[in-house]
Amino acid sequence: MNNSRSTPRVRLMALAVVACIILVAVTERPTFSGFVSGMAGFLGFVLVAIAALGRLWTSLFIAGRKDTTLVLSGPYAACRHPLYLLSLIGMLGLGLATRSVVLLVALVSIAALLHVGAMRVEDALLERTHGDAARRYRAQVPALVPAWSRYAVPAWMEIQPRVVWKAVLDAGSLLLALALVQAAHVLQHAGAIAPWWRLP
C-alpha cells in the first residue's frame, strides 16, 4: 500500500494520542475539580462526537478525488480545510476528556503545529494544480473558520464504498481514543491502576 503525503502527519498525531492515553493511565494529574471535571468530560465527549461525525461527512466530499478535483461543495464551500478544523476540535475534546490542562494544551498544540504546515502545503498544491480557480477559492473562502452562508450541498454526488469505509474507520478511531481516555481515567480513580508519577 502506498503512503500518502499525509501519512507521516497522521502517524505523529496517532503517536501523540497514544502517548496521551498512556499518560492518563499512569500519571497522577492536577485535574479539573468536581463539577468542572464532569463538565470537561461531557464537553470532551460532545466535541469528539462532532469531530468524528463531521470528518465522516466531510470525507464523502473529498476522498477519492482530492488530488484531481478542486472540491467546492459541502463543507469545502464554507472553509478550505474542514478536516483539519474537525481534527483540532477532536483534539480539544480529547484534551478536555483527560481533565488535565497540560495534556489538553499538549494535544491541541501538536495538532495545530502539524496542521498549519499541512494547510500551507495543500494550498500551494491546489494553486499549482488548478491555477486561477484555486487562487479565487483561496481568496473567497476562509481557511478554518467556516463562512456558513457559503455552505452548499449538491443534489447528488458519486460516493465510493471504500471511501465511506475508510471515513468510518477514521471516525471510529477518534471515538475509540475517547473511550480509552475515559476508561484510563475511570480505572485510575477506581484504584485499578496506580499512578507512576505526577504531571505538573
Image (spheres, rainbow, N blue to C red):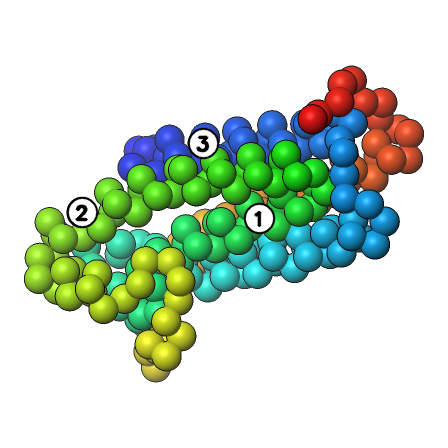
Q: CA distance from mark 2 to mark 3?
A: 22 Å
Q: Among all residues in the image, which is located at the extreme front?
A: 200
Q: Residues within 10 Å of mark 2 (few under 14, many from 20)?
A: some
Furthest toward the left, the residue is 132
Q: Is residue 144 visible?
A: yes
Q: Nearer the viewer, residue 1 or 107?
A: 107
Residue type of the residue flagged with mark 1: Leu
Mark closer to the chain start, 1 or 3:
3
Q: Is residue 159 visible?
A: no
Q: Residue 123 has which mark?
A: none
The N terminus sits in image quarter: top left
Q: Tell me if mark 3 has few (under 14), some (14-19) or many (20+) residues whose alpha carbon lies within 10 angstroms of its own.
A: few
Residue type for callout 2: Leu
- Please state, as top left, top right, bottom left or bottom right, where the C terminus lies in the image: top right
Question: Which residue is at a point 74% across and 51% down the rendered structure image?
Answer: 41
Q: Which residue matches tag 2?
A: 125
At a point 85% along the width and 49% down the height, the residue shown is 34
Looking at the image, residue 112 lies above or below residue 19: below
Left or right of 79, for residue 47: right
Could you say where residue 162 lies in the image, as x and y percent from the top left? Answer: 41, 53
* Among the two numbered marks 2 and 3 on one chain, the one whose residue lies closer to the N terminus: 3
Rendered position, 12 above or below 96: above
Say which residue appears at 78% left-offset and 52% top-offset.
36
Q: According to the image, label 1 marks what residue?
A: 92
Nearest to the observer: residue 196 or residue 168: 196
Distance Cα–Cα, label 1 vs label 3: 18 Å
| Secondary structure category for the residue under label 1 | helix
Q: Residue flagged by tag 3: what amino acid is it?
A: Arg
- To which quarter of the image does residue 80 belong? bottom left
First reached walking from the N terminus: tag 1 or tag 2: 1
Q: Position of residue 104 (x, y in %)?
A: 61, 40
